[in-house]
Amino acid sequence: MLTPPGRATSLALAIAGGAATALAFPDVGWWPTAFLGIALLVLALGRDSARWNALVAAVYGLTFFLPHIWWAHEATAVVPWLALGTLQASYLATLGAGVTWARRAPWLRDRRWAQVVVFAVLWVAVEQWRSIWPFGGFPWGKLAFSQADSPLVGAAWLGGAPLVSFLVAVVGGILAVVTLAVLARSTRVAPLLVGLGVAGALVVAPLLVPLDTEAQSGTLEVGAVQGNVGDPGLGAFANRGEVLQNHVDGTYALLDEVDPGDLDVVLWPENGSDLDPQTALDVADDIDAAAQSVDAPILVGAQEFPADGGRYNVALLWEPGVGVVDRYAKQHPAAFGEYIPMRGFVRLFTDQVDRVTNDMIAGTEVGIIDLDVPRLDRTVPLATLICFEVAYDGLIQDAVRAGERCSSSPPTTRPSGSLRSRRNSSRCRACAPSRPAGRPCRSPPSGSAGSSHRTARCSRRPSCSRPTSSSRSSRCAPASRRRSSPAAGSSAHSGPRRSSSSRSAWSQAAGAGR
């Protein structure tokens, strides 16, 4: 019988496990280390003390989350970063205690292989719990989001992010059991080989998920503009109109790659316009001139300020020569980032709350923009979740049920780890309903202000393509629902063609939805 690890060894294993798990996520992105990280955590929880294992799991959580959400430190200050990391680690503390209590059940006490499954179930339960509570939850750091480049991502088509996280936890648990058997010098080799075989099979089995790669009914030609900013942090909007001008210039730059009328839509990121084109006529003129130059509607990220207070984070579909014809308002504003709960109490710990002077209001409409595509003679329901929203299961599911056939999840300007993590989230989400996904952003993933051009073919699952398969397009059906608002400050002139050193543009062909 192998002796449980000592306290110092447990803490060392937890620290190593948290670090290994962090390496599986951007910026590093070594997805196999997620299995290693979970295996080390399971080994660290080897003592039969719920209190101690809660501490061990919390140490693992701090070691994982604090590097993983380092962008929170860069975007705010030390106290908010530590508070968020500690809160997330506290959920894993409950996991450590729960695993200990579960193992004491008579039917489970001596069945290590069954304990692996129970551990994985509890892990997913904790992930889901922290994704919904408090203040709507924080789904950052789900194991599934580390697997965008692994064969396991195909399992999202069968069971979404929860199934992918479950499989990662099971594989890590199996590695832990095999390690314990080796350390105990077990003479029962066959079960160990079977365990390793099962772990390997679980990793590669999603490659067998039958996802087509051929276009079914046309493609959607999309141009996405990355306008870039001089300061990719919170100073991005220090100069009035700079962000808008960069994206206008980036839209004109698309004409280096396509002719007017070639595109069905141009995507701008969240807050691609730092001014509201519905109230600022000069802004409306600039956007409309850019739209007319490429002869395509632009999906503009902006903010609205209603007369009764607050603000909305919106995506506006701007038709050239017409103005706003459809609109989506962010349904899930980020607590403590876009609005401040318990402002007076939180101010006792940090003055960063005063940087959010106008709390964001949650939208109520499903995240769908109806894009009329004359070339296809149909309307394409375009899912338009904003920034962090891509990490929330329910918002994606609502969009799919509403008929979504292609998705755009524009992020905001943040440090590189945050940006790439959201990109991985989008890629995993695209696999679940098997949809194409596009993500323009205001700053490049490196956080620099430089520019680059690239072209890509986007399809039903372009972002979750595997080494053995290509992406595919899907059919789209007409959608009758349309929300509209009066055009504000629309212009009929085409405007000059411009260029900028701080812009990047790329075009993509996306499946036009079934």
Image (spheres, rainbow, N blue to C red):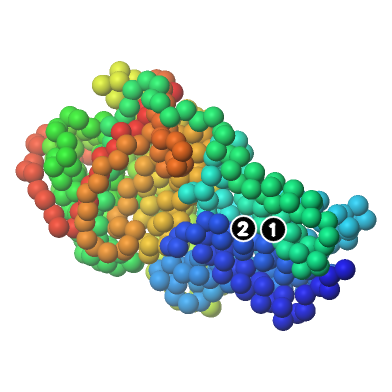
On residue 35, the disc is: 2
**Kind of residue at disc 1:** Leu
Is residue 171 in view from this perspective? yes
Where residue 484 appears, x then y in whole percent? 34, 31
Q: What residue do we see at 57% from left, 34% from top?
A: 208
Extreme top residue here?
377
Task: Tell which of 333 and 472 is nearer to you.
Answer: 472
- Element class at badge 2: helix
Asked if labels 2 and 1 touch by Cβ distance under 8 angstroms, the answer is yes
Identify which amino acid the numbered label 2 is placed on. Answer: Phe
Q: Which mark is residue 175?
A: 1
Q: Secondary structure at mark 1?
A: helix
Q: Earlier in the sequence, mark 1 or mark 2?
A: 2
In the displayed structure, would residue 351 be above or below residue 429? below
Q: Residue furthest left?
A: 496
At 51% from the left edge and 64% from the top edge, which residue is drawn?
Answer: 23
* Quadrant for the N terminus in the image: bottom right
Is residue 176 or residue 144 the one in the foreground?
Answer: 176
Q: Would you say residue 122 is visible in this rendering?
A: no
Q: Quadrant of residue 261?
A: top left
